[in-house]
Image: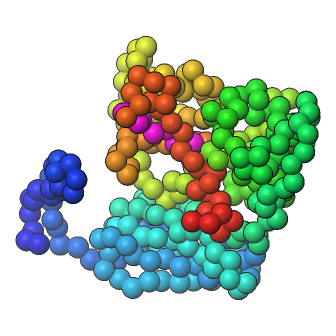
Amino acid sequence: MPLGAALLVATGTSSQKNASVDITVVLGSSLGQSAITGVVRGGAEGTVVHLQPSLGVNSPEATTQPDANGQYTFANLASGFYTLSATSSSGRSVGPYNVQLDGTANDIKKIDLVIPQKRPLAFDRVPSLVNTDQVVYFPEVGHTLKGPFLRFWQANGGLAIFGYPISEEFQDISATDGKTYTVQYFERNRFEEHPEFAGTANEVLMGLLGVEMTKGRTFAPEVPVAITPNQTYFPETQHTLKGSFLKYWQEHGGLAVFGYPISPELLENGYLVQYFERNRFEEHLEFQGTPNEVLLGLLGIETAKMDGWVAP
């Protein structure tokens, strides 16, 4: 392309609608100053970390092996988009994660990778049983829900918020702190049991699946807005929550259930979406005016698919 100002236009195949953005084409370089670094957990020995340029980068795939502490680094990276993944010596893999870099020394993405264990038997269906106050069986998915997880599920929205369980309880390594917890996967989230908080509101915590699913992505801070009944601004994450997403967030648990917004509103796969620490909201205009106008992303299923525990 010639250097200078240009207009980039995209046209929808089905809708024929146009979206455009002004860009400036400058003389670039295959080298930059950005970096991707992190720690590989769950079996770093013999693991290979792969970095594949995907958009806007003219360079071959790069690979590296973590050091004795599991640390890995890719340095001198140019502006563009990359996919990051890792494969262990046993053949188990994690990723790919989409990583966006601006090419400057200030853009250093820290992405910890957890090599998943072999597919847990907890994802296999279990025999039916009689429901009680302490355990519930869901024939739709062939899984049970009991104890602290059942109480948390019932108290915080149940099926509408979390969906069905897609596994039994099992031991798993947290991508957040690298510790092992008793967990259970649901269609829309993952529960973690924290015995150190037994008897408190934090005995069961939800996985930060919104954070995990957006590793490597860049969301520019939003300009603060005036607080009104239809919009609010969170200085903690520098993002705004408004309209139908704000209403849903307020009516279904707010900060305690979903966490802070971590992105602005975005268009993904034809839907207006917004990411939160623990989930993703999706606006479905085909259900406008009904309780299903805002639906939650199936991040529990999507995360389990990335680990190879649920079929794509």
Q: Nearer the viewer, residue 137 or 279?
A: 137
Q: Residue at x 56, y 61 (%)?
A: 110
Image location of residue 285, percent across then percent down: 36, 33
Looking at the image, residue 172 sits to the left or right of residue 246; the answer is right
Q: Nearer the viewer, residue 312 or 99?
A: 312
Q: Residue at x 41, y 31 (%)?
A: 287
Quadrant showing the C terminus: bottom right
Quadrant showing the N terminus: bottom left
Looking at the image, residue 183 sits to the left or right of residue 7; the answer is right
Q: Residue at x 87, y 54 (%)?
A: 127
Specify whether residue 168 is painted magenta: no
Looking at the image, residue 53 sits to the left or right of residue 156; the answer is left
Q: How many marks?
A: 0
Q: Is residue 184 above or below residue 290?
A: below
Q: Is residue 56 above or below residue 259?
A: below
Image location of residue 107, percent across then percent down: 43, 60
Q: Is residue 299 above or below residue 258?
A: below
Q: Is residue 14 above or below residue 203?
A: below
Image location of residue 252, percent across then percent down: 60, 25
Picture colour scheme: rainbow
Q: Nearer the viewer, residue 235 or 59?
A: 59
Q: Residue at x 45, y 56 (%)?
A: 217
Is residue 279 in view? yes
Q: Residue furthest toward the top?
A: 229
Q: Nearer the viewer, residue 302 or 81?
A: 302
Q: Give the magenta range.
A: 279-285
Specify whether residue 282 is painted magenta: yes
Is residue 235 in view? no
Image location of residue 30, percent across then percent down: 31, 79
